[in-house]
């Protein structure tokens, strides 16, 4: 009888120990995510419709998130509008410019280039990001994009001034003075001069506007190519800056510019001269001249324009791009309008030409330095 009692006590004691071990194991496995990620966390996943890389990472993200009970997963398609903000605009606030992209607690960003399709590495990065992510400043998962640190916004004044400075370009002023001289030396009077100025400015405005809207439209439809466009524009702006500095040296040594005007543009100028002499179709021909000028003189006038395009793209607010472009283009043509009015009402075209010839080296140097500085600032995401 005593033996049975002792045996029963031993069984109870062993079962109690097994029970305690089981309870401790359960608590241990339950506490692992709590210890490593004690607070509620948020993960934001950015993707694009039709993106094969995005489709491949979704199962990994869902699997990792499923291991934790305190993570809110929010998915954003970059071209879709979410309460007035596109997924692409939200993504760029975190410094991400391509999909797929994952942001943990609004601070830890994981890009495709971090793992290059390696799902095991992605899983490790996600787990490490979750367990080591800093606490969110606010736990409200519905916090708007404005509560983060956004990129500095373009101002209308900044865009207008950039266009205004680009308008005071020796190339543009040279052609403008040439057209004014033709008009004033023909039978045309002030009215013809003003018509010619308006037509020329309209041509510049239309071509620059269409070109800018085309670039912004491409970015809107294919946000993934933004990095490539940005790099291309930065290189182009830098090359134009170096070319302007070289042209300043070329002007000082050879007294002529390295920017050469195509023969087709010269023939167009001759056609304008003939029409001005006859008083025919001044508005149409000068408008065409302005449009052609915008194309063939891009190295002279267009470099700052490309910089503005890149800044607009970098802000991610493509909807405002058209307004910025219109404002910039108005800034470009405004000096031409002012010059045209002054020439029509008494300014001597020879004096304008004389000023341009005397200061063209200085203008080239200043323009080159500004363009190179712009390229560096854009590349390093300072602006």
Image (spheres, rainbow, N blue to C red):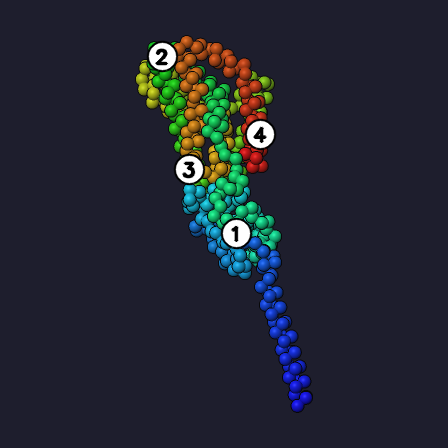
Q: CA distance from mark 2 to mark 4?
A: 41 Å
Question: What residue is pinned by disc 4?
Answer: 373
Question: What residue is pinned by disc 2?
Answer: 190
Q: CA distance from mark 1 to mark 2?
A: 67 Å
Q: Secondary structure at mark 3?
A: helix
First in sequence, mark 3 or 1: give its number. Answer: 1
The residue at the point 54 percent across, 20 percent down is: 363
Residue 123 relative to residue 349: left or right = right
Q: Is residue 383 above or below residue 10?
A: above
Question: What residue is pinned by disc 3?
Answer: 319
Measured from the top left, where is residue 97 in percent x and y? 51, 43
Badge 4, how many Cα within 10 Å: few under 14, some, many 20+?
A: some
- Which of the two marks, 1 or 2, is nearer to us in this view? 1
- Which of the two marks, 4 or 3, is nearer to us in this view? 3
Q: Nearer the viewer, residue 306 or 24?
A: 24
Give residue 124's quadrant in the image: bottom right
Badge 1, how many Cα within 10 Å: few under 14, some, many 20+?
A: many
Q: Secondary structure at mark 2?
A: helix
Question: What residue is pinned by disc 1?
Answer: 42
First in sequence, mark 4 or 3: give its number. Answer: 3
Q: Is residue 96 above or below residue 125?
A: above
First in sequence, mark 1 or 2: give its number. Answer: 1
Q: Where the C terminus falls, by quadrant? A: top right
Q: CA distance from mark 1 to mark 4?
A: 38 Å
Q: CA distance from mark 3 to mark 1?
A: 28 Å
Q: Nearer the viewer, residue 289 or 255?
A: 289
Q: CA distance from mark 4 to mark 3?
A: 27 Å
The residue at the point 55 percent across, 49 percent down is: 105
Q: Secondary structure at mark 4?
A: helix
Residue 331 relative to residue 239: left or right = left
């Amino acid at each position: 009888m005593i033996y049975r009692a002792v045996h029963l006590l031993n069984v109870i004691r062993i079962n109690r120990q097994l029970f305690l071990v089981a309870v401790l194991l359960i608590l241990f496995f339950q506490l692992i995510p709590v210890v490593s990620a004690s607070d509620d966390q948020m993960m934001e996943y950015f993707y694009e419709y039709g993106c094969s890389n995005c489709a491949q990472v979704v199962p990994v993200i869902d699997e990792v998130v499923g291991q934790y009970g305190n993570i809110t997963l929010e998915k954003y398609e970059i071209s879709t509008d979410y309460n007035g903000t596109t997924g692409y605009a939200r993504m760029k606030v975190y410094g991400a410019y391509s999909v797929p992209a994952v942001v943990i607690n609004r601070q830890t960003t994981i890009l495709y280039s971090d793992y290059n399709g390696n799902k095991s590495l992605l899983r490790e990065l996600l787990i490490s990001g979750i367990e080591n992510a800093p606490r969110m400043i606010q736990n409200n998962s519905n916090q708007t994009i404005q509560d983060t640190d956004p990129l500095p916004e373009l101002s209308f004044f900044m865009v207008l001034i950039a266009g205004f400075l680009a308008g005071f370009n020796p190339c543009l002023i040279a052609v403008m003075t040439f057209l004014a001289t033709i008009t004033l030396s023909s039978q045309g009077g002030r009215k013809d001069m003003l018509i010619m100025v308006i037509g020329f400015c309209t041509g510049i405005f239309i071509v620059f506007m269409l070109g800018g809207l085309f670039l912004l439209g491409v970015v809107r439809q294919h946000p993934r190519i933004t990095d490539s466009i940005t790099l291309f524009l930065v290189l182009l702006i830098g090359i134009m800056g170096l070319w302007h500095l070289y042209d300043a040296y070329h002007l000082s040594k050879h007294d002529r510019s390295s920017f050469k005007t195509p023969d087709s543009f010269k023939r167009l100028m001759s056609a304008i001269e003939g029409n001005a002499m006859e008083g025919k179709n001044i508005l149409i021909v000068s408008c065409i001249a302005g449009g052609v000028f915008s194309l063939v003189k891009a190295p002279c006038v267009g470099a700052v324009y490309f910089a503005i395009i890149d800044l607009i793209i970098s802000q991610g607010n493509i909807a405002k791009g058209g307004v910025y472009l219109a404002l910039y283009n108005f800034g470009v043509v405004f000096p031409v309008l002012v010059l045209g009015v002054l020439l029509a009402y008494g300014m001597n075209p020879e004096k304008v030409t004389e000023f341009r010839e005397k200061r063209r080296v200085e203008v080239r140097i200043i323009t080159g330095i500004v363009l190179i500085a712009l390229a560096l600032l854009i590349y390093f995401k300072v602006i």
